Image (spheres, rainbow, N blue to C red):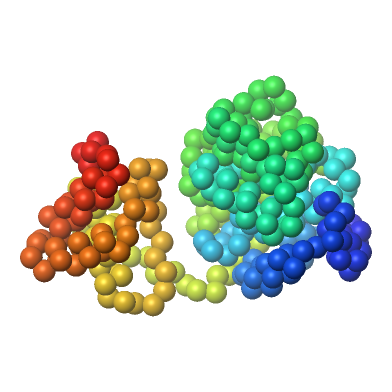
Amino acid sequence: LFSSLAEHAHGLLNPFDGLPYSSRYYKLLKEREELPVWKEKQTFRESLLHNQIVIVSGHAKTGKSSQIPQWCAEYCLSAHYQHGVVVCTQVHKQTAVRLALRVADEMDVNVGHEVGYFIPFESCCTTETILRFVYCTDDVLQREMMSTPLLNCYGVIILDDVHERTVATDALLALLKDVLLSRPELRLVILTAPHMSSKLQQYYGSVPLIRVESKHQAEVVYSCSIQKDPFLSALRLLFEIHHSKEKGDIVIFLACEQCVICIEHINTRNYQIFCSLKERSSSSCMIQRLAKAIYRDKGTDAGS
C-alpha cells in the first residue's frame, strides 16, 4: 500500500508536493529516527492498515504527537485521499500551532497548504490541506460533527493526549465509536499515556495496542502534604531540584494557561531572586515574593 511513497523517497521527491527534498529534511530525518516511537513505525502502519482503531501509549517526549500524524498522512496519500484527509485533535491550542509548524518542517512542506491548524478565532487551512491539527474543543471538531455527523472529509482521526480526560475529548471518544460503525473505512488513532491504555481497550474491545518505550524513565515526585497553593508548591520544588544540579529534565503539569505563562517568565534574574531569598526567608514566603516579582514584571496582579 505504501510502495508509491517508497518510490518517491528513492527518487528524492516529496510525495506530498512532488518537489525535491531539501537538505534540512534529511537533517530532521536523522533526528526523527532517534525518537523512541520510530521503532514502532512498521508495526503502526500494519495495524492502521488492518484495523479501524489503533491505540498508541507512551510517555512524553517519545515522538507520538509529531510522527504518527505523518504516518497517517502517508496512509491517506497511498489511498489517494478517497476516504478523506487526517485530523489530529489537541487539548491546547498552543500545542496545535507548535505541532503544525514542527510537522510541516519535518515533512518539508508549507504550513497552511499541506499541513495546517484550526483553533478558535484562527484558521491556517485551505481546501487542499491534507493534515490538520485541531484544538479539541466543543466548538471545533464537535461543531463540525453537528453539520457533518459522519465527518466524511476525514479518513483518519487522531485523538491526542486522551489521558487528560477533558470533557471534549471524552465526548469525542463516545461519538466516534458510533461514527466508526457507519464508516468502516474510517480509522481512529488514540494517543495516550500508559496508565490509560487498559481502560481504552476495555471500552473499544479487542483493538491493537502499541506501547512506545521511552529511552529515559521518569521519576514522579509527590508532595508529602496537602498544599494550599499547588502552583507555588510546584514552583518551590522546581527551584529545589534545579538548585541541586541533578542531571535530566523536569516536567511540570500545570492547571491553567496563566500558570504556564508565569513559569515561562522565570528567567535568570528571577532565579537570582530565589537564591537571595533562600538565605533569609521561609519557603512559603520566598516563593510568594518570587511569584509577586514575576507577576509584577508581567503587569498582572498576583492575587487575581
Residue 202 visible to the viewer: no
Against 181, is 283 above or below?
below
Residue at (66, 23) in percent of width and height: 146
Reply above or below: 258 against 182. below
103 or 58: nearer the viewer: 103
Residue 211 placed where, x, y %? Answer: 62, 64
Residue 30 x %, y %: 69, 72
Q: Residue at x 58, y 65 (%)?
A: 62
Q: Is residue 232 visible?
A: yes
Residue 266: quarter of image: bottom left
* Residue at point 16%, 52% (across, down): 289
Q: Position of residue 202 (x, y in %)?
A: 60, 49
* Residue occupying the point 52% across, 61% down: 60
Quarter placement of the C terminus: top left
* Residue 239 left/right relative to 166: left
Decide if residue 279 is on the left or right side of residue 225. Answer: left
Most foreground residue, 243 or 276 = 276
Tally of marks = 0
- Of residues 72 and 296, the one nearer the viewer is 296
The residue closer to the viewer here, 277 or 185, is: 277
Q: To which quarter of the image does residue 257 belong?
A: top left
Location of residue 2 in the rendering, given as x and y in whole percent from the top left corner:
87, 59
| The furthest residue to the left | 280
